[in-house]
Amino acid sequence: MSRKDGYDAIVIGAGIIGLSCAYYLTKAGKCVLVLERGQVGSGTSGACDEMILLQSKAPGLSLEMAFVSLDIYRSLQAELGEDLEFETRGGMIIIEKAEHLPIMKGFVAKQRSFGLNVEILSKKEAKIKQPFVSDSVVASTYSPDDSQVNPLRVMFALLRAGTRAGMALKRGSEVTSVTRTVWDSWEVATAGGHVYSSDVVVNTAGVWAPRIASLVNLLLPIEPKRGQIVVTEPIHPFGETNAWDSEYIVSKLMPDLPRDERAERLGLGFALSRTRNGNYLIGSTREYVGFDRDTTHEAIEAISAKAVSLFPALANVRIIRSFSGLRPACGDGKCILGEDPQNPGFFVAAGHEGDGIALAPVTGKFLADLVCGRKTELDVAELSPARFRKAEVMTKHLN
């Protein structure tokens, strides 16, 4: 094995979460190495939509972090000196079933109590903002703050800015071991035979984060969920905002409500967003199929049918391609952010599922604060991997 110079921090994974963490650590004066098993964004971050959707966030820490993240995004283009295709178009959650309306009203009321600018629109008001929405809808929500950004542009802008400041990236570097030394530092070995040393290791490996964590005997309950998305031909914009539907959110709020068998199995939701080039991204599914990233005819047909049922005009629009990615879903529904109490210097930033794009800036900033011993703007103790160590102790006690 060849031994390399030491670093202040090694970040494992070059998706949007990893590159955000690496950028903010570098900005804090740390000497940072990023190790990526494939290419930049070759995991979840390169196969997702562009949404920064505040309305989907549960009232509490998740929503508060989204506020901070959106504020960062508003100034990030100027800071990085690149066009990130950041836009605030607002967003609507289409309510298509009468029984969903009181549930969404309660959800919106709680979000408003946490400061989100959101309201319920009548069917008539909804059709003013989205003239092509189906006549069968009941109502919608609306927030002027929902935004979007191009994740690929964000990743490469963070990489270039970090590299200019001294950050290093090693592609094709699959991590095979993470070892605590007698000097209380870390050694990280790769399949290529290289060993790198650092004071801090940050696990941002997305759906592969459990494998990295297992190298230090930490069990992370992260599972991949496959998300399939279709892309339309470029078309003229229709409607003022991006749009979603209420069914997936209601299914999370009220899991006992019956759903169509196929929708339940596919984890089917609806999301519609327009890219800078005029294509529409329409999704998506959330399927437990292991690490299978193949797209399927069934899912594409289900997504297309859902889209046409909500926006009948889409029946005449061609789908030009489809893609899928794996979302890192944590078992308790929260992302993981913090230091492992049994492995000082080993940090985790993972498990964001579908919120990685929205929460990337705040995750990177808060992670850097934690590594540097600074107080984070919000109390993120509940996101620490320590919660899984407590679960281990309870399980051992019960056994």
Image (cartoon, rainbow, N blue to C red):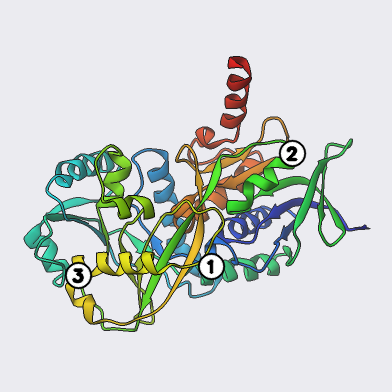
Quadrant of the rendered image containing residue 266: bottom left
Q: Residue at x 72, y 47 (%)?
A: 201
Q: Residue at x 58, y 62 (%)?
A: 43
Task: Give SS at disc 2.
Answer: loop
Say what amino acid the circle numbered 2 marks: Val
Judged left or right of residue 11, residue 258 is: left
Judged left or right of residue 335, residue 280 is: left
Say what amino acid the circle numbered 3 marks: Phe
Between 260 and 396, the one nearer to me in the picture: 260
Numbered mark located on residue 216 in the image = 2
Judged left or right of residue 198, residue 289 is: left
Q: How far across and down, in percent of the image, does residue 103 sit?
A: 20, 41
Quadrant of the rendered image containing residue 386: top right
Quadrant for the N terminus, please.
Answer: bottom right
Reading the image, the residue beneath label 1 is 46
Disc 1 to disc 3: CB gap under 8 Å: no
Packing grade of label 1 (10 A; few <14, some 14-19, many >=20) is: some
Between 247 and 57, the one nearer to me in the picture: 247
Reading the image, the residue beneath label 3 is 311
Quadrant of the rendered image containing residue 319: bottom left
Figure check: 376 above or below 38: above
Say what amino acid the circle numbered 1 marks: Gly
